[in-house]
């Protein structure tokens, strides 16, 4: 145990170097900075927006539209006594993102119940999604005004009838059933909430797997590159202890790095969404609880076990790939197959449903050990415990096979003679 | 007195390539036994097998009357190996590196301290041991590695080209250190291309080529047998 701890301490010290600390600190700062910047932009977008307006009609109706916009937190900069072309130029020089032109005759058309047209000119000064939000809100306001105007028309023409019932005679009340539970919500809302609830799982898995694997591959490759491996292999410590110490150190440091990364990511997301996201989450939370679509303690334990096994598989695989690498540089390229193995199920889980894909693709996905943590949350919700425990058992088997294989390599000549160069094995003879 | 190491009919192949075709030699207590031969002769393979890095093929290896194959951990406790192209952990300070290595062999903190003190004495690097190994010259690195190999006073030190790449003064110092530790009871199995070094250090020499030992004996015996003035002539004569 003393020897193992000695080695573990050394491995951790080797991994936690100045470069890692600086890179993690930089990541944290960057996330925080971008999050704060985004928050300001979001606040700007949802704050009071300035709109230029040219009212060529001057009727009570056009005034009502502008007043309606003002009550919807828009600041209206009225352009008086100008032509449309002049107004477009004036608004271009200002800060307005939108110019609203109400043509003459607008009020009369409304009175005659003819479709009336207003023109909007959006000034695209940036192409960000947040930047384009102003015009979407204007569309919402116009839609609301349309409702008000059509309601008043219907009330005038058909007094005593509810305009809303006339416009939408068929109403739907949506329910979602998950197994034996039922709640009032639409399927798309629930799917969206499930997806946002499980958003962090693939991100956490990707981060930990990539960080840890990179570390364990580098730890072995650096021993080779710095010519320290031969000496280490002749000291009186079991080869399995060398493997375990390297994997454990990489796992711990990888976990820490991923934790810091996730903390940064959370502050970044918090910066963007802030209170809006929290409010949405609390609204949806009740529906999710009603449908049983949440993790209880056992759910979290199963999810944790799945993530943990995936990390172990990644570390064992990385250990073998590290042995194959000649030096640090080739170790970095060795990481590519591993990253693809994590990314394939990630992207498939984003765009497709594992249960509906064809059998060969399903087998292919399930054969990748890293697919299982992506599927755990979904299977937990649906009560597919066979799939969950099957996945856990499969990952355990893969991990055992890989560790036995890694231990065999470390205990054989291959640790010194096996090298992989773009798909071909080369045996080095001393 | 029993041999420290007895090798009989040792063979080793890499795939279809024969690296050792059955070699026999023994290392006696307190002697320096050298393997000399051209590149690819099988010297490093032999040393790596004795250092437990490579698995032996056919043949037997007996270390202090223990079965080499069955008890590799016991062997590792009593030997030390200095590879030709060895390195130390660059981010570690010299002293930390010595403590790290000593920890694997020491049973108590006192013993660990004794090992490190001995290594500090061997290196003669003084305060430079408080700086990172990455800042050391080749000579300094080689000295710290040799100190690491000798600090535990191993029963058998396996040294592959111990003065490789060193200047004349550093090489001389390294040879003197090796001789000193042999006097204190450590046996040495070494390989070298430097015939002067072989003559200076070795008690007995084996000439190896194509995985076979061609001749062996003390430097004086070999010179007489090959009617040679020095070991370089013995080397040339034996390869003809």
Image: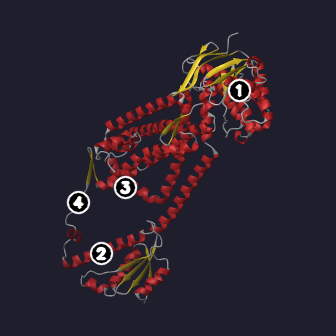
Q: Residues within 10 Å of mark 4 (few under 14, many from 20)?
A: few
Residue identified by numbered label 4: A172
**Residue at disc 1, secondary structure:** helix
Which image quarter: residue A244? Answer: top right
Q: Chain of mark 2?
A: A
**Residue at disc 2, secondary structure:** helix
Q: Residues within 10 Å of mark 2 (few under 14, many from 20)?
A: few
Q: Chain of mark 4?
A: A
**Label 2 to label 1: alpha-carbon separation:** 105 Å
Q: Chain of mark 3?
A: A
Front in this rendered view, residue A292 or A395: A395
**Label 1 to label 4: alpha-carbon separation:** 100 Å
Q: Which mark is residue A146?
A: 2
Query: Could you say where residue A249 lies in the image, as x and y percent from the top left?
Result: 56, 37
Q: Earlier in the sequence, mark 3 or mark 4?
A: 4
Do tag 1 and tag 4 residues touch (Cβ < 8 Å)? no
Asked if one can make out residue A351 in the rendered structure from this viewpoint, the answer is yes
Do circles 1 and 4 both sit on a common chain?
no
Query: Could you say where residue B4 lies in the image, as x and y percent from the top left?
Result: 67, 15
Name the residue rendered at 43%, 57% in the picture: A277
Front in this rendered view, residue A263 or A332: A332
Q: Which mark is residue A283?
A: 3
Residue identified by numbered label 1: B236
Q: Residue furthest top?
A: B1
Q: Residues within 10 Å of mark 3 (few under 14, many from 20)?
A: few
């Amino acid at each position: 145990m003393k020897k193992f701890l000695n080695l573990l301490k050394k491995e951790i010290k080797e991994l936690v170097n100045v470069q890692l600390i600086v890179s993690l600190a930089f990541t944290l700062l960057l996330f925080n900075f971008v999050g704060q910047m985004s928050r300001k932009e979001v606040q700007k977008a949802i704050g009071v927006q300035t709109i230029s307006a040219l009212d060529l009609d001057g009727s009570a109706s056009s005034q009502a539209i502008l007043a309606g916009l003002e009550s919807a937190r828009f600041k209206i900069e009225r352009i008086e006594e100008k032509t449309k072309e002049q107004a477009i130029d004036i608004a271009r020089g200002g800060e307005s993102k939108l110019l609203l032109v109400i043509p003459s005759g607008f009020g009369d058309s409304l009175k005659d119940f003819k479709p009336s047209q207003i023109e909007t000119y959006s000034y695209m000064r940036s192409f960000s999604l947040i930047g384009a939000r102003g015009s979407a809100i204007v569309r919402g306001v116009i839609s609301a005004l349309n409702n008000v105007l059509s309601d008043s028309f219907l009330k005038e023409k058909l007094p005593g009838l509810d305009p809303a019932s006339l416009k939408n005679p068929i109403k739907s009340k949506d329910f979602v059933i998950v197994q034996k539970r039922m709640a009032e919500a639409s399927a798309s809302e629930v799917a969206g909430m499930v997806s946002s609830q499980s958003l962090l799982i693939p991100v956490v898995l990707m981060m930990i797997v990539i960080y840890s694997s990179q570390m364990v591959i580098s730890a072995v490759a650096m021993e080779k590159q710095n010519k320290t491996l031969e000496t280490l292999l002749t000291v009186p410590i079991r080869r399995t202890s060398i493997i375990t110490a390297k994997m454990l150190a990489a796992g711990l440091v990888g976990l820490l790095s991923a934790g810091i990364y996730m903390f940064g990511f959370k502050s970044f997301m918090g910066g963007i969404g802030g209170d809006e996201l929290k409010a949405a989450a609390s609204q949806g939370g009740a529906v999710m609880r009603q449908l049983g679509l949440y993790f209880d303690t056992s759910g979290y334990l199963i999810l944790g076990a799945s993530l943990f096994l995936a990390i172990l598989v990644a570390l064992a695989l990385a250990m073998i790939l590290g042995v194959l690498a000649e030096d640090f540089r080739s170790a970095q390229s060795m990481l590519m197959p591993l990253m693809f193995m994590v990314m394939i199920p990630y992207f498939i889980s984003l765009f497709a449903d594992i249960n509906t894909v064809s059998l060969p693709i399903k087998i292919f996905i399930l054969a990748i050990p890293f697919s299982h943590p992506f599927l755990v949350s979904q299977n937990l919700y649906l009560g597919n415990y066979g799939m969950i425990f099957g996945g856990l058992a499969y990952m355990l088997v893969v991990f055992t096979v890989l560790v036995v294989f890694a231990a065999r390599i470390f205990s054989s000549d291959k640790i010194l003679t096996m090298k992989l160069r773009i798909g071909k094995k080369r045996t080095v003879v001393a | 007195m029993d041999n420290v190491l007895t090798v009989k009919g040792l063979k080793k192949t890499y795939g279809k390539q024969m690296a050792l075709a059955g070699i026999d030699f023994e290392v006696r207590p307190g002697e320096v036994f050298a393997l000399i031969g051209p590149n690819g002769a099988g010297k490093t393979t032999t040393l790596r097998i004795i250092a437990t890095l490579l698995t032996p093929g056919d043949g037997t290896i007996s270390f202090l009357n223990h079965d080499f194959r069955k008890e590799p951990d016991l062997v590792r406790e009593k030997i030390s190996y200095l590879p030709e192209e060895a390195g130390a952990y660059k981010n570690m300070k010299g002293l930390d590196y010595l403590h790290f290595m000593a920890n694997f062999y020491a049973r108590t903190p006192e013993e660990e301290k004794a090992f490190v003190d001995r290594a500090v004495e061997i290196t003669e690097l003084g305060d430079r041991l408080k700086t990172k190994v990455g800042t050391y010259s080749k000579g300094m690195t080689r000295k710290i590695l040799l100190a690491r190999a000798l600090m535990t006073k191993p029963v058998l030190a396996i040294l592959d080209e111990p003065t490789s790449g060193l200047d004349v003064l550093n090489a001389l110092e390294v040879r003197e250190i090796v001789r000193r530790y042999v006097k204190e009871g450590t046996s040495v199995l070494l390989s070298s291309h430097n015939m002067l070094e072989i003559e200076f250090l070795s008690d007995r020499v084996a000439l190896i080529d194509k995985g076979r030992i061609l001749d062996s004996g003390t430097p004086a015996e070999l010179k007489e047998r090959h009617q040679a003035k020095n070991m370089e002539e013995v080397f040339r004569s034996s390869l003809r």
